[in-house]
Amino acid sequence: MWSNIPLFPEQASTIAGQIDGLFAFLVGVSLFFGGLICAVLVYCALRYRRRSEDERPLPIHGNLRLELLWTGVPLALAMVMFFWGANLYIANARPPANALEILAVGKQWMWKFQHPAGAREINELHVPLGHPVKITLASEDVIHSVYIPAFRVKMDAVPGRYTTVWFEATKTGTFHLFCAEYCGTSHAAMIGRVVVMTPSEYERWLSGGAAQESPVAAGERLFEQLGCPTCHRMDGTGRGPTLAGLFGQTQRLQTGETVVVDEAYVRESILLPNAKVATGYTPAMPTFQGQISEDGLFQIIAYIRSLSSDKRR
Ligand code: CUA
């Protein structure tokens, strides 16, 4: 639809057309009413101008029909915009369950990606065509923002927390990848590309690189190295809770509150172990703040998740 208009980047994801549709509607409504108001303004200025010094207009006491009209029409338009936008937002915020999970770390000034099978790349992301891809984002320093105009997706990478973005590519080819949040001197150089390949090409690309340790295997190694199994024993007899089968469960805390064991909770428990202590345990765990990189956290979380049947979350 927009391919002949150089203002718009190519549409290369399932959601791109829908985003552009909403955008066109918003621009259309704004242009229509902007034009209408200008036209009425000019018309009234000419039609009802003061023609003599002692001309006095008739006082106006209101017009119910007009009042209803100019309340009702904007309300209806605003509701259409709201529900249309909210619908798209929700669709865009919920990655499908079968999405390919890519881990991404932004740092000054590059993007690091890791595929579930272990392959790593920098400033370049290879993805299969026609398959949903979910990117979990972390930042090692300041706020960055991953932006792929052709897919109409953009998401901040915020230090200290995880954010996610997903898309499904509908065209093979190479697309721009930008950092869209000013992050320091070389922000403008923090660019890269997304290469969309057919699924078989993607498989070939994956197997073509040097064999790399998967995040789960790397996480297990790190888990051992840091001495975690001393307390978090598999059989549950350790000083800390066993992590087998824990991921995806609802955990009761000392305070009586509950928390779902997800990426964010595991991350917090590694860095700030005393923030949310599981019921029945003492806050005995030391913090690992500053000892594990964002990559390492991703890997340990991948490992802990692999201990649970709930592989997806
Ligand atoms: Cu990273 Cu701008």
Image (cartoon, rainbow, N blue to C red):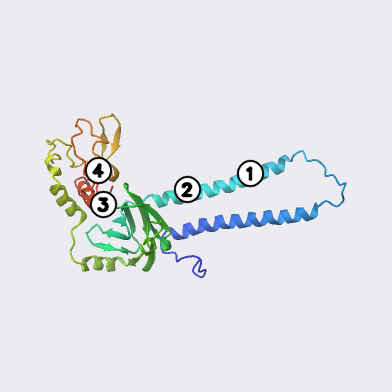
Report the mark closest to the observer, 3 or 2.
3
Labelled pair 1, 3 in contact (Cβ < 8 Å):
no
Rounded to the nearest angstrom, the CA distance separating label 1 from label 3 is 51 Å
Work out whether residue 130 or residue 62 is closer to the camera in this orientation and state it: 62
x then y, percent, for residue 1: 50, 66
Q: Is residue 24 above or below residue 273?
A: below
Report the mark closest to the observer, 1 or 3.
3
x then y, percent, for residue 230: 11, 41
Q: Which mark is first along the chain, 4 or 3?
A: 4
Q: Which mark is residue 86?
A: 2
Near mark 2 (Cα within 10 A), the count class, few <14, some 14-19 or many ≥20, is few
Q: Which mark is residue 271?
A: 4
Q: Which mark is residue 294?
A: 3
Labelled pair 2, 1 in contact (Cβ < 8 Å):
no
x then y, percent, for residue 112: 29, 59
Apparent side of residue 27 relative to residue 162 in the rendered image (left or right) = right
